[in-house]
């Protein structure tokens, strides 16, 4: 036991990710395994959503357990204080809440010129209220993630890395953390694209988008030190992927939308890097924009 505690104290972030992945992936497979391995269609399989919700408990569970182990009640109170920190400049709420939906809307607006299948459902659906109902569950679900990612991992990474490097590290792991969820949805929504091609492209687009957005989230958190604002920013991204803004796409149309949204998010990262050199800059990695 002493050896394990010593390892955790010496490798806090590594221990956090090992525990998070172990909890999340195990619960996902335990709850959704029968449907996942049977390649059941994710939108109709009743096990998909419970499996995702079970997976979401991993980051918070790992973060709170390790916080309690390493810093006790004082550490848990500190996370609570950051979660309750709401007095930040209004512009950060604007950035946190609008970045994802605005970029999503712009990408879909451009694509809808070529085809109406890209029109946001909120513009075409008759029952708009029904589209808004899933948003109610988004806040709780993303809180389970951010108590871990932003509550535990990011502050510790920032002690050794800049904003950009921290965002890239967390984002590069945040994407693969969704692996089983991505594989389940990609494996049954490939449309006319061969599964062997669609799945890796789907995965790459997802990881690219999540990494870019996480860089932006770390930047906002670094400027506000508010876990609440980080949670709202995550919730905004999650809501923009729901059928409020994002239409139900598959195959080639989904890959086009996903790749353009990823590009838009990385353009956002580049804009921030160029306009806020103090907090987000390529020089943190020893790189220089072309």
Image (spheres, rainbow, N blue to C red):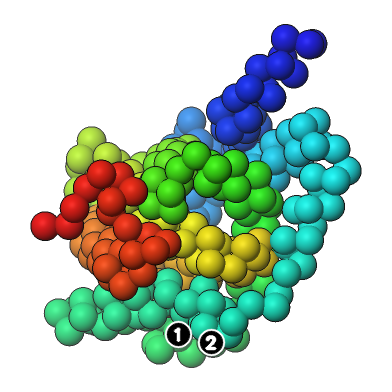
Q: At which x and y percent is residue 93?
A: 56, 79
Return the residue found at the far right. 73
* Frontmost residue, 141 versus 12: 12
Return the residue found at the far front. 278
Q: Secondary structure at mark 2?
A: helix
* Frontmost residue, 62 versus 286: 286
Q: Is residue 263 above or below residue 154?
A: below
* Frontmost residue, 48 versus 138: 138
Q: Secondary structure at mark 1?
A: helix
Identified at 54% across, 87% down, the residue is 127
* Image quarter hosting the C terminus: bottom left
* Image quarter hosting the N terminus: top right
In this image, 163 relative to 11: left or right? left
> Could you tell me if residue 190 is visible in this image?
no
Q: At which x and y percent is residue 255?
A: 24, 57
Q: Is residue 237 above or below residue 289?
A: below
Q: At which x and y percent is residue 271?
A: 28, 70
Query: Which class describes the residues within 10 Å of circle 1: few (<14), some (14-19), or many (20+)?
Result: some
In this image, 212 relative to 96: left or right? left
In this image, 265 relative to 232: left or right? left
Q: At which x and y percent is residue 287?
A: 22, 48
Identified at 69% across, 24% down, the residue is 9
Identified at 52% across, 83% down, the residue is 91
Q: Are marks 2 and 1 in contact (CB under 8 Å)?
A: yes
> Could you tell me if residue 35 is visible in this image?
yes
Residue linked to disc 2: 128
Which numbered disc flags the more N-terminal residue, 2 or 1? 1
Q: Is residue 39 above or below residue 98?
A: above
In this image, 93 relative to 248: left or right? right
Identified at 59% across, 41% down, the residue is 156
Query: Which class describes the residues within 10 Å of circle 2: few (<14), some (14-19), or many (20+)?
Result: few
Residue linked to disc 1: 122
């Amino acid at each position: 036991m002493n050896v394990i505690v010593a390892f955790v104290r010496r490798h806090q972030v590594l221990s956090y990710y090992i525990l998070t992945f172990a909890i999340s992936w195990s619960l996902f497979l335990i709850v959704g395994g029968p449907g996942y391995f049977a390649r059941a269609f994710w939108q109709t399989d009743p096990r998909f959503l419970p499996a995702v919700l079970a997976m979401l408990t991993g980051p918070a569970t790992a973060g709170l357990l390790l916080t309690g182990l390493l810093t006790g009640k004082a550490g848990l109170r500190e996370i609570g204080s950051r979660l309750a920190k709401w007095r930040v400049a209004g512009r950060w709420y604007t950035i946190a809440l609008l970045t994802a939906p605005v970029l999503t809307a712009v990408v879909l607006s451009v694509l809808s010129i070529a085809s109406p299948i890209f029109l946001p459902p909120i513009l075409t659906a008759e029952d708009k209220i029904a589209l808004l109902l899933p948003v109610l569950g988004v806040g709780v679900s993303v809180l389970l993630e951010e108590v871990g990612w932003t509550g535990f991992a990011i502050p510790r990474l920032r002690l050794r890395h800049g904003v950009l490097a921290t965002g890239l590290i967390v984002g590069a792991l945040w994407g693969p953390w969704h692996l089983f969820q991505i594989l389940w949805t990609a494996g049954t929504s490939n449309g006319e694209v061969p599964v062997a091609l669609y799945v890796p492209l789907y995965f790459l687009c997802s990881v690219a988008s999540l990494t870019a957005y996480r860089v932006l989230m770390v930047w906002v958190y670094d400027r506000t030190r508010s876990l609440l604002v980080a949670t709202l920013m995550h919730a905004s991204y999650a809501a923009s992927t729901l059928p409020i803004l994002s239409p139900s796409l598959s195959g080639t149309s989904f890959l086009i939308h996903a790749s353009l949204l990823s590009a838009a998010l990385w353009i956002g990262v580049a804009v921030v890097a160029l306009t806020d050199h103090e907090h987000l800059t390529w020089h943190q990695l020893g790189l220089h924009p072309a």
